[in-house]
Image: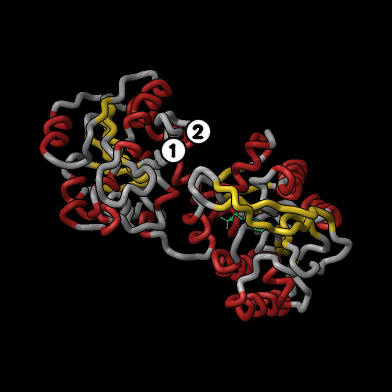
Amino acid sequence: MAKLNVQDLDVASRRVLVRVDFNVPLDAEGKITDDSRIRASLPTLDWLLERGARVVLCSHLGRPKGRPDSAMSLRPAAQRLSDLLSRPVAFLDDCVGEKVEQTVKIMKDGDCLLLENVRFHAEEEKNDPAFAKRLAACAELYVNDAFGSAHRAHASTEGVTRFIAKSAAGFLLQKELRFLGDELANPARPFLAILGGAKVSDKIAVIEALLDKADALLIGGAMAYTFLRVQGIPTGASLVEEDRLETSRRALDLAAQKNKRVFLPLDHVVARRVETDKLDKKGRKIVEFQEVHITDCASIGEGLCGVDLGPNTVAAYAKAVATAKTVLWNGPMGIFEDKAFAKGTFEIARAVAASGARSIVGGGDSVKAIHKSGLADKITFLSTGGGASLEFLEGKTLPGIAALAEK
Ligand code: AMP
């Protein structure tokens, strides 16, 4: 059943609580270093404000552990949003209580108010009903536009909907559901899924779900070494999840049964990982990579770690991507934070952009790589959800979406 959308609501002169995802990165001085999450909320906010809604915004920022922490205040987001909307955005230093109730009472049509970080209250993450009710008290309607938090049953994403007459999906949430849901349910073929990142354990359920939908899977990142090990290929000191060997073997068997090709690296950039006595800013030992070189086959020598795709793998993956009509990509192909090991990730980004396929990229790191390589306008859809997009692709019900009213 389709969910109620913000366009289905009569919002004029109504107080509308909007759950946004303003979980933006801040520098040491509290300045926002990337405002794309705030920008992503503008279509919904413009739509509401132009129709005379009285908009009350709530969000989380960081992990403040259930108590106020000025380093994670949403105050800077109010100023940035005000600049982007070209209208004043008021800010309150709490998200529930007397002050909030008094302020929303005197709001006028087209006013916009941002509440303080909902995670300053421990009740938020506990989905405490009394807290959800207090949050709901400030509005008559609720709109969820925070896809990135929809996989969490928290008070501001799930609990609150029990105490508000109507709850609907904002434009950003709708877009995520359209691209990750409808589009991938009926993809133009061949449909290729590229999966990378650190851990098989994070993505095995997605891999299994994609074996039903995609025509082929391309595996990169540290995840690939667990799969190589399953095939008896030596992986040296690369990151391998020993406790996931059996699950990975089952995934490969399943792929074979379903006649789906799984691409694994043919060669690698490898290095020796050396822990030095030097400490970083957080007091952790700085790791250096020595003896960096390219292997001439899939196996990795003793003591060496795979850190990026090798050139033959990049060429093979790029060739496969070039034939695709739909591409889904989640997770980097190597330790791309280190410039020396970013080539695989950036080459795959270029191949996806050049393919002309419908392309959907999710997960913070792959989206970052797309932006860094200046290719964002060549990608059909950049998902804003990391964990949420993975859980959605696994076929799980996301509590923040399930809680919205049916059309
Ligand atoms: P994820 O959050 O699971 O998408 O993983 C992203 C992380 O995986 C990034 O921080 C990468 O540095 C890391 N990663 C990718 N490839 C490797 C690799 N070969 N060895 C270790 N870490 C890797």
Q: Residue furthest front?
A: 277
One can see residue 5 in this view: no
Disc 1: which residue: 24
State ligand 1's quadrant.
bottom right
Give left or right: position of 297 versus 231. Answer: right
- Image coordinates of residue 88 in percent, x first then y, are 31, 20
- Image coordinates of residue 92 in percent, x first then y, are 23, 32
Residue 201 higher or lower than 162, as above or below: below
Secondary structure state at the residue bearing disc 2 = loop
Q: CA distance from mark 2 to mark 1?
A: 7 Å
- Name the residue located 36 percent from the left edge and 49 percent from the top edge: 63
- Name the residue located 63 percent from the left edge and 37 percent from the top edge: 371
Residue 306 higher or lower than 92, as above or below: below
| Amino acid type at mark 1 | Val
Viewer-proximal residue among 262 and 2: 262
| Amino acid type at mark 2 | Asp
Viewer-proximal residue among 44 and 152: 152
Q: Earlier in the sequence, mark 2 or mark 1?
A: 1
